Image: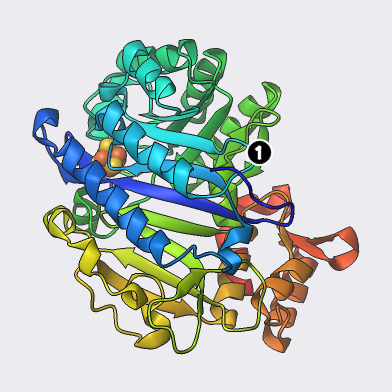
Amino acid sequence: MSGATAQATPLGVYVHFPWCLKKCPYCDFLSVAEPEADRIPHEAYADQVLRELERRLTVGLEPGAQGEALELRSVFFGGGTPSLWDSAALGRVLRGILERLPWRELPEITVECNPTSLDLERANRLADVGVNRLSLGVQGLEDARLEFLGRLHDGALGLQAVADAVASRVPRVSADLIFGVHRQSPEAARAEVLRLAELGIEHLSAYALTIEPGTQFGALARKGRLPLLAEESVADSFLAVEQALSERGFAHYEISNYARPGARSQHNLGYWRGAQYLGLGVGAWGTVRVSEHAGTRGTVSLADGTPGGTARLVRYRNTPSPERYLRADFSQLDPLMSLGGACASRQPSSELMSELEELSPETQVSERLMLGLRLAEGVDLEQVEAETGASVLTAERRRAVERQLERGGLEWLEGGRRLRIPRAAWLQADAVIADVM
Ligand code: SF4
């Protein structure tokens, strides 16, 4: 539905689709291997996601609640591999979201895709159900490196999938690449991003390979059996990618993200700027502001961003078990458990939720700094204080900021209102952020 007000508070929706054809050895996302796409419960999963949405909004957007001021800016189908989801089932979920949440301009609607499950026909089917952005997990273009990464596709299929996405009726295409892999030179990383840029994508996420503890790569690295690239070479690749893309007119707007003018990811900007997002589906995280209205059990409302009053910021995570999610009875879900349970009991004790936490103002400030300092625009400290109700520059944090200002790790913008890491220090961003935190 449309009808959001001019002072609206931005809201994103994240829908997790947990199935993949195979588990990649470096991946620590919640994903379940199902080699037979036909065995995925496409319709039953869509039904459950819609039931979850309905249940959360029944208790969340009541007439007269502050939730009316929310404005849906983005919907992101992530995974797992949501391009495996039957497009009609995915479209049903999308329609439900667009009908139930307020928006003024059509939100950015992204589907993450794998080259093994995207071709021209499928991209057009996604366009027909309303998807306006595809994000393709290309990860690399060299066959040996893709094999090392455990991908099911080769470089040619990755290129074909990107070309199909660009040729389709979906207007916007992004690609994901991994650099800093064993035996990959900075020149090779540069050549790959240039090849993708030539195909007509307008957004690119380039991540250095990271070894996560609970993965196959993590286990191999612990035993010293995973060949890794030297840190200096990874840094050289980061600089090579940045230079190549800036020559092609891409702005480096976040440490790992590049966009042509007007093509920044609205959904991810929401995360980095601390916007609320409703998470739906298996293992989905959500962070929403809720209000409790005394005396009326079940009246938990998605609230606008105004601090104070009874509004609290709550983060929840749905169960990571597809079986449990698929059999959950949402009609039986206690509304105070579904969004505001933290306010009432601080117990994530529902069948659906595995985690639930109320974010203190101090935690909110830390998260806003941790994420916002990754952006070229930096962090608006006045806005963070207004939205969290907490002071950003505590005595300890002020000392860290001054230390980093002296070292060139931070700089002030807008007369000391906005803080950011200058481009020249982005390679040290993790250390700068850790110091400030
Ligand atoms: S396809 Fe993506 S989500 Fe699935 S296992 Fe591989 S990296 Fe993880």
What type is the residue that disc 1 sits on? His
- Image quarter for ligand 1 equals top left
Q: Is residue 221 above or below residue 92?
A: below
Which image quadrant is residue 129 in?
Answer: top left
Q: Which residue is mark 1?
A: 252
Q: Is residue 36 above or below residue 221?
A: above
Q: How is the image coloured?
A: rainbow
Q: Residue at x 19, y 57 (%)?
A: 325
Q: Position of residue 298 (x, y in %)?
A: 38, 77
Q: Residue at x 34, y 70 (%)?
A: 338
Q: Residue at x 14, y 30 (%)?
A: 37
> Is 36 situated left or right of 50 in this image?
left
Quadrant of image for the C terminus: bottom right
Outermost right residue: 415
Q: Position of residue 218 (x, y in %)?
A: 25, 54
Q: Secondary structure at mark 1?
A: strand
Q: Position of residue 57 (x, y in %)?
A: 42, 60
